[in-house]
Image (cartoon, helix red, strand yellow):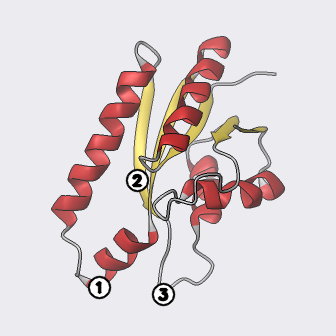
Amino acid sequence: MEVETVLAPVDGSEAAMEAFEYAVAVAERYGAEVHALHVLGEAASRGLETGDVDDEDVAALSEEVMEAAREIAGETPITHSSAYGFSSSRLTQHPGSVILDAADEVAADFIVLPRQPVTGDPDATIEKAAQYVLAYATQPVLSV
């Protein structure tokens, strides 16, 4: 199997950052890069759409999450992007679909994400997407 890009969705939760460590290990094993996708939770996504949440605050949060990801990645090459996990105008937009769309956009060969909800943390957006991604991804998926 050839792996050039490992997609690792992150939301700042402990479970997502632990899964990110696995993504880095997979990337190191295959000499690949990691693409960190910061998936914004429902409150941030809807708040940005309505103007109730300041985009500078969300940008600062995203940079915080990406800084933690860069620290974990060490010497492993990393790229990153952000996406709304939810939309009030696109009912089919949810964390699972956002992750799969990003996987296609970055030509990911492998996806690593946390398991279906284990923490119950309402901000742990990605955990809620695991089952969907496992069911519909065309790439190999490691759910940890």
Residue ID for mark 2 = 82
Which quadrant would residue 95 be assigned to in this image?
bottom right
Residue 59 horizontal side relative to residue 85, left or right:
left
Task: Decide which of 116, 5 is in the foreground and name it.
Answer: 116
Q: Amino acid at mark 1?
A: Thr
Q: Residue 123, position in %: x, y?
A: 45, 61
Q: Position of residue 113 (x, y in %)?
A: 63, 43
69 and 91: which one is in front? 69
Q: Nearer the viewer, residue 141 or 116?
A: 116
Report, in whole angstroms, how far the alpha carbon at label 2 lies from the one at label 3. Answer: 18 Å
Query: Does dot 2 land on a helix, a strand or a loop?
Result: strand
Distance between mark 3 and mark 1 Cα atoms: 11 Å
Q: Earlier in the sequence, mark 3 or mark 1?
A: 1
Task: Locate residue 136: give its quadrant.
Answer: bottom right
Task: Tell me if label 1 and label 2 are in contact, CB under 8 Å.
Answer: no
At x 47%, y 85%, the residue is: 88
Which residue was labeled with disc 3? 89
Q: Do the residues bearing badges 3 and 1 touch, measured as CB atoms within 8 Å?
A: no
Instruction: Work out whether 31 lies above or below 144.
Output: above
Q: Secondary structure at mark 3?
A: loop
**Quadrant (top left/top right/bottom left/bottom right) for the C terminus:** top right
Rendered-image quadrant of the N terminus: top right
Mark 2, other Cα within 10 Å: few <14 / some 14–19 / many ≥20: some
Question: Three-letter amino acid code at disc 3?
Answer: Ser
Badge 1 or badge 2: first in the primary sequence: 1
- 114 vs 58, left or right, is right
Which comes before the other along the chain, label 2 or label 3? 2
- Give the label on residue 50, or none: 1
Q: Residue at x 57, y 55 (%)?
A: 126
